[in-house]
Amino acid sequence: MREIQEFTLEELKHHLSEKAFSGQTVVLNMGPQHPSTHGVLRLILELDGEIIVNCIPDVGYLHTGIEKTMESKTYQKAEVLVDRMDYMYAMGNTLVYSLAVEKLIGLQPPPRAEAIRVILTELSRIQSHLLWLGTSALDLAAQSTFLYTMRERELILDIFELVSGARMMTTFIRPGGLWRDVPVQFEKMVRDFTKVMPKRMAEYESMLTRNPLFLDRTKGIGKIDTRTCLAYDVTGPTLRASGLAHDVRKSNPYSGYDLYDFDIPTQSEGDVYARYLVRMEEMRQSVRIIEQAMDKLPYGPVRDPNYKYVPPPRSEIGVSMEALIHHFKLWTEGFIPPKGAVYTAVESPRGEMGVFMESNGTPKPYRVHYRTPSGPLLHALPVIAKGHFVADMIGIIGSIDIVLGDCDR
Amino acid sequence: MTFAMFLEWFLKALILVLGLTVGFAYVTLFERRLLARMQVRIGPNRVGPAGLLQPVADAIKLIFKEELIPAKADKILFVLAPVLTVIPALIITGVIPLGPPIRLFGREIALQVANLNIGILYLLTVTAISIYGIALAGWSSNNKYSTMGALRATASMISYELALGLAYVGPVLLAGSMNINDIVTAQKPLWFVVMQPLGAIIYLIGANAEINRTPFDMPEAEHELTAGFLTEYSGMKFALFYMAEYIKMIAVSMIGASLFLGGYWGPGVSTYPWLGPIYLAIKVILLLFWFIWVRATWPRFRYDRMMAFGWKILFPLALLNVLVTALVIVLIGG
């Protein structure tokens, strides 16, 4: 039997204070198996009593090598992998990938595809925020909220299942448009959801927003100011909760976000409660966007007709020789985008999610790099956590809403 | 001491312990079903009709589970800790009268295991003992999370136990006795919750902290300390901790019902003494419902805030309550 390697403080010498070596403080290993580190995050905490002196996030337990694997797959096949990164925003992962490929080639998805993309990614944002709300309330032991949010999340996952056949790993948004048009039941399901959501939001708020114990656990906890956010490249609700109204949907509109009327909620405190308020308001704004998009959902095709890059519809393959050849070429060799490098970004529920893609004139991408929001959030975590209680640490991890699949790629 | 008396004590104690153990099993089911109702779930309903055999299945599972003792744990204390927790929980209710005396087999039988004239003191001391079980469990596990849970338990215990003790004083002053029988009898015309609303609220909060349930479940906060002092326990030893928690839940409900809600009194008890235990059971179930409802609704306290709450709010309020009660009794009753 192999000796179990003892965890040594020497490895962490440069992270810990002197006191840890004289035994005045305790080094606590939190995770990667821990009920509330939201995945496989490992934190090494140096504690003075219950107060955190140092916090060292140790990532990599969910490393999948997706970015590297994508280099050995064609552009179409690589897309399937990106769903698995930020599994809470799979629609957005494929959207940003498709936007990058479209930018590389110069494809223009039709207006109907753009509107459906907006609806689906906003639904995705709501379901991610719902899971965040549920789990971060659960971390503070408000367990009922978790099950209420799961109830609404289920409605959204049902919509995803309807349009794509998969509940989470949808790969529905493809370069040049969508995999296919949405079924007829789509409109009713989305309308039902947007009708019921504001009522349910009021329900969650009645359980938390003015609950004195919840306020006690969230107000003034885990503060981070705008300067630190920017220094650590933190984006998304965490940045907006500290006062800066930065949102990729407004600053660099994509998929026709400039057609919709919505606000960017901000708060100035930068604490856990501010992040809570920002996300709650974001869900409302997302519902607003979905309603507008549903109202002006145009009819028409959902794919760019450039069949050199976009697979022709199934119905054409049987009757058109050209379509059959395109289909064969696309699914064997793949398409060859022009040489070049592009960067596109979307607003994920956690912040700016960008993709840098370089093409070297082969059917496979030379390099795909995702700029994901969870990494910077984890970098900033030690700064946020210092001086707080272990109990607050849980609230802070919940409030910055990291997804480890997003961080380790 | 005749053989009959001895037999009576023995049987009463046996019935109480068995009743509590069965009660524990069904409180877990009650809690799970009720929580499920509150959280738009269904809850366990597969084992037996309406899930009624679920506790039996759970018990069998826990008995047959492998029991692990961590390699570096203090083995004696590790085994002793659950026992130390569960025994006080089982014996607390010995002093609670379950009903007025009834005649059975030609004997006058008091529905109470022991009629102590210092019943309140007994309650205070016995409930306080079980903290040793938690502290030792945390210490002997040789696990940082467990130790932190134990530290939290001991630190918070001091802050709520004082207020809880003072909440007991109100009924004692009103009844003029520390005997729980006398306290219950004194509530025949009017329940003490009417005269002691503040005391009753303080008791409810203190009792909730006493049984380490949400929002006061810092010692075993599974989201922070994985499971606190329970982290290293498995199988039957784990079940014993759970048993202690739920039996204490029943016990504090019985104490609360006896001190503030008139114990076994209710319409018709004077004529039909056997109605007493039924009324008591209804009151206990209502209080259990309250504890479960609180668990479904509230987030957890942070332990330093809880200590501040105990010392800065609960304790002064409890003192004030005692002072006002005493003054009023001296001015009116004295």
Image (tube, rainbow, N blue to C red):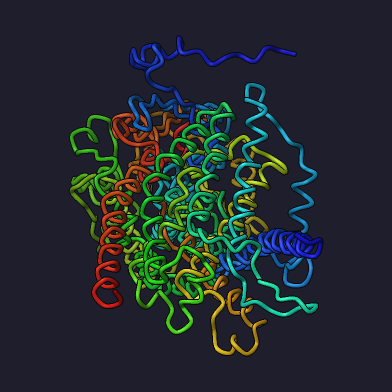
Instruction: Note whether residue A124 is visible.
Output: no
Q: Nearer the viewer, residue B181 or B46?
A: B181
- Judge whether B107 appears above or below A356 on screen: below
Q: Nearer the viewer, residue B146 or A183?
A: B146
Q: How many marks?
A: 0
Quarter of the picture containing the C terminus of chain B is bottom left
| Horizontal relation, residue B255 to residue B321: left or right | right
Q: Nearer the viewer, residue A99 or A216?
A: A216
Rendered location of residue B125, percent (x, y)? 50, 49
Rendered location of residue B138, percent (x, y)? 54, 34
Rendered location of residue B253, percent (x, y)? 53, 65
Quarter of the picture containing the N terminus of chain B is bottom right
Q: Nearer the viewer, residue B92 or B184?
A: B184
Rendered location of residue B246, percent (x, y)? 60, 56
**Displayed quadrant of residue A122:** bottom left
- Judge whether B303 appears above or below A256 on screen: above
- Judge whether A224 appears above or below B125 on screen: above
Q: Which residue is depicted at the point 75% across and 53% down? A: B59
**Displayed quadrant of residue A394:** top left
